[in-house]
Image: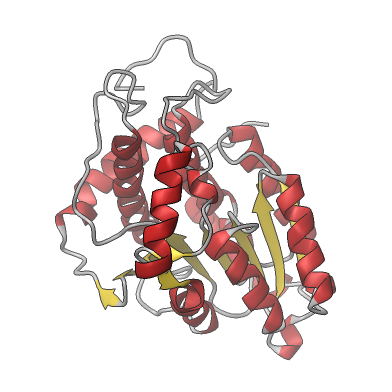
Amino acid sequence: MMVVITNSNRGFLMVDRQRDNDVDAVRGARSVVVTGGTDGMGRAVVLGRAERGDRVLAVGSNPAKGDRLLAAAEEAGLGERVGFLAADLSTIAGNQKVIEHVTAEYGAIGALVLAANRQSPKRIETSDGLESTFALYYLSRYLLGHGLMPTLAAGLRRSVIINIAAVGLTSGQIHWNDLQLRDRYRTITAQLQAGRANDLLGVAMAAQFGHQVPYVLYHPGFTRSGYSAMEQINPLTRALIKTIGRAAARPVEKAVAPVHDFIDAPPTAPLTAVDRGKPVPLGLKTLDPAAARRLADITAALVNADPIRTTRGDGW
């Protein structure tokens, strides 16, 4: 099934809030969906929310990591509160799988935490013909935010979307004429472009939905939280980063603390941006509303078209 995103999605916000069938709602617990939930910060958020009494669904691409997460939850006495869904979020079909599962299993969710990312030293195209970093780090977050909006808007309490990326950084750019980086791929170029795309995604989502479902852009900084995002990086480089991380990176518990705060008390402002504990001015050049609208229009055209395209224009 193809994901279709149009301006008619504004109608999602009219969903009857009485439809919340989360059995934990009465006692104040939430249902939370976490992508990248089997490793690093995502895993910490999953277990932390379960400890607080929430029902949590972790989404990841590696079933073995999912099994380890479920085993850890069971050992901690949290087995009934943690679930796992295997899905390849670098594909449109994988995101649709998540949307369909959450929509069927949850009447409402209180938070969507977007943490999935993976670095690739070589350019890889997904089955949809898209550059993999763009697809996983940016497009997945676009698809899930829009596709799960009815479920986010259906609760009795204010829900929130938290996009864990790199807001506040100004390096990197959107390569409007080559969004799939066919001519200039570098690992850092792909990561920075997707990071700036997530900045614009937050601006666009907040403008469209933020008065009811606030959007948070959160940059935790260098965090000692696992290294799944670097699984495909050269082993020597990965070992060096791990060594530096042990000395300089923030503990994962401190890095995820603001995420818990945002879930416990969603902001009232449509858009909140935080870079390593400091508010980011919403007038920053990387949060330009015109650029956000431009990227949103291009992305909507992409996902509403045939996912596998042989002829591309406008940089696709």
Residue shown at 83%/71% (left/top)? 74
Residue 9 place in picture, x, y as percent? 51, 49
Looking at the picture, does residue 9 appear above or below residue 269?
A: above
Q: Quadrant of residue 186?
A: top left
Quadrant for the C terminus in the image: top left
Residue 143 place in picture, x, y as percent? 52, 44
Looking at the picture, does residue 234 appear above or below residue 208?
A: above
Residue 194 place in picture, x, y as percent? 36, 43
Residue shown at 67%/73% (left/top)? 47
In this view of the protein, can residue 210 be seen by the observer? no
Going by the image, does 155 lie left or right of 277? right
Looking at the picture, does residue 281 appear above or below residue 85?
A: below
Looking at the picture, does residue 68 appear above or below residue 120?
A: below
Quadrant for the N terminus in the image: top right
Residue shown at 69%/82% (left/top)? 51
Residue shown at 39%/80% (left/top)? 268
Residue 16 place in picture, x, y as percent? 65, 68
The outermost residue toward the bottom is 27
Total labels drawn: 0
